[in-house]
Amino acid sequence: MFTANLLLSSLFLASSVAALSPLLDPWHARPHIPYVDEPDDSVSVFHVSTHQLISSYKETFYFDQLIDHNNPKLGTFKQRYWHNYEFYEPGGTIVLSTPGEVNAEHFSSYLTNSTINGMIAQATDGATIIIEHRFFGESNPYPDLSVESLRVHTIQQAIDDLEYFAKNVKLPMPGGDEVTPDKALWILIGGSYPGALVSYVMQNKPGLFFAGYSSSGVVQAIGHFWGYFEPIREWMPKNCSSDVEAVIKYIDETFDSGNATAIHDMKAIFGLEDIVHQDDFGAAMKLVLNYWQGGNINQESVGFYGFCDALEVDKGKSAPASGWGLDHALKAWGAYWKNSFYTSACGNATAEDCFGTHDPNSSSWNNTELSDSRSWKWMTCNEFGFFPVGASEGYPTIVSRHLTPEHSERGCQYDFPGAFTGLKKSSLLNALKVNVAYGGWNITTERLIFANGERDPWREATVAANGASFPKMDLQPHLLSDGFHCSDMLASEGSSKAVKAVQDAAVGYMAKWYADWKKKQSA
Ligand SMILES: *[C@@H]1O[C@H](CO)[C@@H](O)[C@H](O)[C@H]1NC(C)=O
Ligand SMILES: *[C@@H]1O[C@H](CO)[C@@H](O)[C@H](O)[C@H]1NC(C)=O
Ligand SMILES: *[C@@H]1O[C@H](CO)[C@@H](O)[C@H](O)[C@H]1NC(C)=O
Ligand SMILES: *[C@@H]1O[C@H](CO)[C@@H](O)[C@H](O)[C@H]1NC(C)=O
Ligand SMILES: *[C@@H]1O[C@H](CO)[C@@H](O)[C@H](O)[C@H]1NC(C)=O
Ligand SMILES: *[C@@H]1O[C@H](CO)[C@@H](O)[C@H](O)[C@H]1NC(C)=O
Ligand SMILES: *[C@@H]1O[C@H](CO)[C@@H](O)[C@H](O)[C@H]1NC(C)=O
């Protein structure tokens, strides 16, 4: 039911790029919440109890948001939002959510009960709102993404946006000018980066939101993020991980040998002999793993399993858990690249044009036109990190250890001239600052629900990370399913019993907290 292929379409839209385009680098293809079928434009929405015809899901509203919360004199920009009050009853909740690092206009299903947002609203007499995050879609403080404009593109400004919106919006519904957080209960929901934002807002603005739901919330910023590949390695078919590990080990040993002939021959197996630099080659080999994130409960990633089939199925037979071994895996992976993957990824560009990141003079850098992927890239360069790298020495790896943090850090420096010099170069330090400011894994806030999926590649940045020692409290439930990225936000993913249990528990907590509060009011 949902187009899990967003990531893949981003991946494959790119062709004929001058250097590694942000679209081609799926790291910067944004890890946001999944789309689901949007409600039909022509559908009339009726209020559940009054049966009156109310606004369409698609009507766009505009809020005058401060450009800079540290300097209100700079004025305002138009921030888009969408709203629905079919479940709202006076005294009910206001359920706010941003899809984050993406144009928000295709997320109106997050106003309805086909998502957790609407389910929670339905259980708490709530109205739903989707707000577009600053610097994405059409909610732009400035007409470009120059380094100067991006100065006001920070996590803190995004947090302050949500506060300013909640305190000042006049919602387009009966009584909508009487529901600010001093008068009504606000609930904040988000998945992925916006899931982290839920946690950050509740820590940074205590008492503003009554409750929060953080799905796959990447609360812990991590500079060098090889943990992204751990859930993939753990959950992919065993034969496929065995063979991928063997090929990557061979690639790394060949690079380490320094034997130029052997290195050339190894790259040529994949048709990538003209990639000059080892980290660019490592990034190219990693690309296919990004298919994993497109998976979901109802449809495991077709792209990812297609890749494993190409490696593991030979003359109609599939390999045992130990895989076919290096020789076959190299040949099969090489053919996979040459037969189809290369064209999908690079179109007719040369491999060096497609994957090279070492030319500071490439015309692809510093393109300051508005673009969601550049805007998200700024957030990773400036604060989050989450840069893809091979696993640390001593751990098994499905990504070349020659893919080092410099690969992404260099991209930051070339793409945003002057912004990332000195200490700002360090993704480790940038991430540390985020964690110190907003608590990372250590967050302790009441009525904040964390929901995670074991198969989510972002799992290691969430409170469900292996070995994360986070504080547990009665009023801060940690829910876990076998889901993928943000699975628990979608009613359709409730076809997994575990996902359904997470959703039922979350809705149950919200309904109880709401009922307890109402009881206290009337006492
Ligand atoms: C959504 O609400 C309708 C009633 O308005 C109900 O029939 C349906 O079961 C609800 N769906 C979910 C997933 O809760
Ligand atoms: C081997 O690979 C095939 C094809 O991807 C897969 O269907 C099967 O489950 C794998 N078997 C094992 C034991 O990993
Ligand atoms: C370098 O690699 C080539 C091709 O694999 C091989 O023939 C040659 O012996 C190697 N040279 C050394 C010094 O190992
Ligand atoms: C590469 O493909 C693009 C369209 O995808 C086309 O416009 C361009 O002419 C092609 N270039 C070459 C050299 O074939
Ligand atoms: C980039 O351009 C500058 C100025 O034209 C030149 O000095 C420099 O050598 C170029 N760098 C590379 C890596 O081509
Ligand atoms: C980056 O692009 C902006 C806008 O086009 C331009 O003003 C600026 O000079 C560029 N910076 C560099 C270092 O090329
Ligand atoms: C989280 O708590 C641990 C253990 O008390 C501490 O070592 C760590 O510095 C804390 N992290 C942050 C970001 O506050």
Image: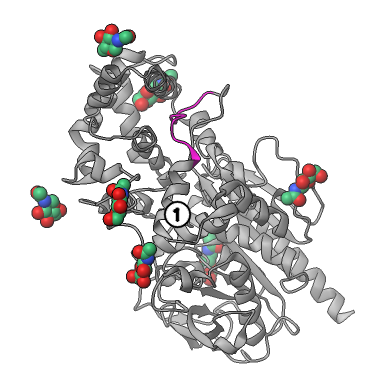
Location of the C terminus by quadrant is bottom right
Q: Is residue 421 above or below residue 324?
A: below
Q: Residue at x 68, y 53 (%)?
A: 435
Residue 72 drawn above or below residue 406: below
The magenta-colored residue range is 396-405
Q: Residue at x 50, y 47 (%)?
A: 495
Q: Is residue 320 left or right of residue 67?
A: left
Q: Position of residue 382 (x, y in %)?
A: 54, 58
Q: Quadrant of the N terminus?
A: bottom left
Q: Is residue 401 visible?
A: yes
In the rendering, at what x and y percent does residue 175 appear?
63, 92
Q: Position of residue 452 (x, y in %)?
A: 61, 47
When the figure is inspected, residue 388 is found, relative to residue 513, above or below; the finding is above
Callout 1: SS: helix
- Residue pictured at 66% horizontal, 50% vertical: 432
Does residue 368 appear in this view?
Answer: no
Give the image quarter of residue 253: top left
Q: Residue at x 45, y 76 (%)?
A: 139
Question: Secondary structure of the magenta portion, mostly?
Answer: loop
Residue type, mark 1 in image: Gln
Give the left or right position of residue 306, taking residue 76 as reference. left
Is residue 401 a member of the stretch shown in magenta?
A: yes
Nearest to the observer: residue 233 or residue 68: 68
Pick the front one: 168 or 502: 168
